[in-house]
Amino acid sequence: MFVCIRYTIAIFVTSALILSLAANVAAQTPPSRATIDLNTATAAQLVKLPGIGASRARDIIDYRGRRTFRRPSDLMRVRGIGRKIYMRVKPFIRVGPPAAATSG
């Protein structure tokens, strides 16, 4: 009987761990496979990317104010974004033409 209880507890703990890991992965993955344009994305859109928080989103927007992104790999030129983060967000980003300046 003791072995049965021990086995049940082991299965319960393993199941809880698997569910916890699955929830963590789901939280880091954007909800859709739609890509985000680095030249036009808002901070709210950028923070949905894995590894990008409010501070990095602000850094991306600041960089974009000085230079436009010509290719997705230009994201690694932003302070705090290296190859590791770039590889995580690469499937979810794209670079379109720069936003046209509006004249008023």
Image: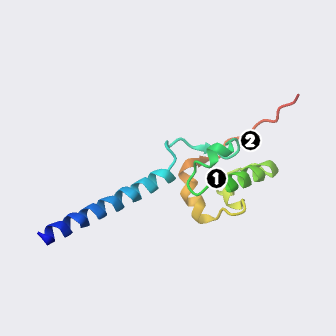
Q: With 29 as the anchor, is 5 left or right in this view?
A: left
> How many labels were placed on the picture?
2
Q: Amino acid at mark 1?
A: Pro
- Crowding at label 2, few (<14), some or many (≥20) Cα neighbours within 10 Å? some
Disc number for residue 98: 2
Secondary structure under tag 2 reads: loop
Look at the picture and state if 100 lies above or below 91. above
| Residue receiving disc 1 | 72
Most extreme residue toward the top is 104
Disc number for residue 6: none
Q: What residue do we see at 40% from left, 59% from top?
A: 21
From the viewer's side, name the closer residue of 24 and 69: 24
Q: What residue do we see at 88% from left, 28% from top?
A: 104
Q: CA distance from mark 2 to mark 1?
A: 13 Å
Q: Amino acid at mark 2?
A: Pro
Look at the picture and state if 82 lies above or below 42. below
Q: Quadrant of residue 41?
A: top right
Coordinates of residue 89 in the picture (x, y in percent): 57, 54
- Crowding at label 1, few (<14), some or many (≥20) Cα neighbours within 10 Å? some
Q: Quadrant of residue 15?
A: bottom left
- Of labels 2 and 1, earlier in sequence is 1
Coordinates of residue 13 in the picture (x, y in percent): 30, 64
Q: What residue do we see at 45% from left, 51% from top?
A: 26
From the viewer's side, name the closer residue of 24 and 65: 24
Secondary structure under tag 1 reads: helix
